[in-house]
């Protein structure tokens, strides 16, 4: 059985949704970030970076949310969350998942933690404002892509990229232009939250609506 080390609403959300979409046995192990559990010796033994999520799969302690999503999808091909290796469709899933994790997710961390990028208050506010503008542009980029195909991010089939994007949309709830306000992105995200497995993940984490 898999163990997912998580905190409600954090980077563990995407792997949590993927586990529920697959429907395999797993347990969620809460990590209390406010109490610093992620810096305790037992957690650091799993992830020396002190970050969640971690997926324990037998002797493997896997970190990085996107890698966990792909690993789970690979181990459960019947769930259809990644196309066959070597196909153009799979390359497309790589493309969007990497865009989400190394571009949009990274920018979101600048928005959440601008104090890590500047010292004085005015500079910190500037970092946050620039991050929000850049994130709005990224949402537009995603919405423009959805015009070309859909109903999912990588075409006609649900993939690991979809729950990953929904997680990031959840993080943008308090922005001036949340994802639900972006044409095409809002209806697409609504479709995702109507999937019972995805709604169950939000509910299990105790997250109240709206979810994006
Ligand atoms: N790139 C990593 C980011 C992991 C990450 O930064 N997780 C945050 C929660 S969203 C965390 O554990 N933060 C604790 C801290 O910064 O001390 C991933 O996608 O898994």
Image (cartoon, helix red, strand yellow):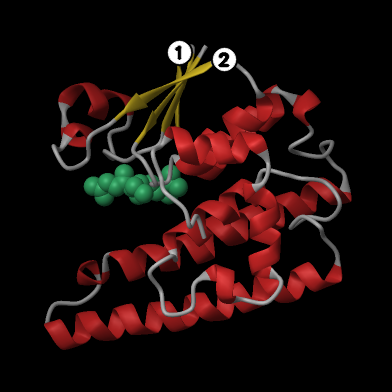
Which residue is drawn at the image coordinates 26% and 71% (left, top)?
114
Seen as rendered, the residue at the extreme front is 209
Residue occupied by mark 1: 59
Using residue 1 as the reference point, say whether residue 183 is left or right of it.
right
Note whether ligand 1 is within 8 Å of mark 1. Answer: no
In the image, 177: left or right of 139?
left
In screen coordinates, is 1 left or right of 119?
right
Q: Quadrant of residue 106?
A: bottom left
- Residue at left 36%, top 41%? 8
Mark 2 in CB contact with mark 1 (< 8 angstroms) = no
Q: Is residue 14 above or below residue 118?
A: above
Badge nearest the viewer, 2 or 1: 2
SS at badge 2: loop
Q: Nearer the viewer, residue 105 or 47?
A: 105
How far across and how far down the image is residue 19, in percent? 58, 28
Front-lying residue, 13 or 94: 13
Q: Is residue 2 above or below residue 81?
A: above
205 vs 162: above or below: above
> Where is residue 61, by image quadrant?
top left
Say what secondary structure mark 1 lies in: loop
Q: Please give the name of the residue rendered at 79% of the width and 33% of the height, measured from the top-left corner.
A: 80
Which residue is painted at 47% across and 42% down in the image?
Answer: 13
Separation of residues labelled 2 and 1 (CA atoms): 17 Å
- In the rendering, at what x and y percent does residue 22 appear? 67, 27
Q: Is residue 163 above or below residue 81?
A: below
Position of residue 108 in the picture relative to residue 22 (left or right): left
Q: Circle 1: is it few (<14), some (14-19), or many (20+) Cα within 10 Å? A: few
Lower position in the chain sequence, tag 2 or tag 1: 2
Residue assigned mark 2: 25
- Which quadrant would residue 138 be assigned to in this image? bottom right
Camera-side residue of 34 and 186: 186
């Amino acid at each position: 059985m898999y163990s997912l080390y998580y905190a409600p609403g954090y980077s563990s959300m995407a792997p949590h949704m993927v586990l529920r979409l697959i429907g395999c046995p797993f347990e969620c192990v809460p990590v209390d970030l406010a109490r610093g559990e992620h810096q305790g010796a037992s957690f650091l033994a799993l992830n020396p970076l002190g970050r969640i999520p971690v997926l324990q799969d037998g002797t493997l302690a896997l970190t990085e949310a996107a890698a966990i999503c792909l690993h789970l999808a690979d181990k459960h091909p019947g769930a259809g969350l990644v196309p066959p290796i070597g196909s153009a469709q799979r390359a497309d899933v790589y493309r969007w998942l990497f865009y989400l994790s190394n571009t949009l997710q990274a920018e979101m961390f600048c928005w959440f933690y601008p104090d890590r990028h500047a010292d004085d208050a005015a500079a910190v506010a500037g970092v946050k404002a620039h991050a929000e503008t850049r994130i709005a542009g990224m949402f537009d980029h995603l919405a423009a892509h959805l015009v070309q195909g859909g109903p999912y991010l990588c075409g006609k089939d649900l993939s690991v990229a979809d729950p990953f994007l929904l997680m990031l949309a959840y993080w943008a709830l308090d922005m001036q232009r949340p994802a639900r306000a972006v044409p095409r992105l809002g209806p697409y995200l609504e479709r995702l939250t109507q999937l019972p497995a995805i709604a169950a993940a939000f509910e299990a984490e105790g997250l109240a609506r709206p979810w994006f």
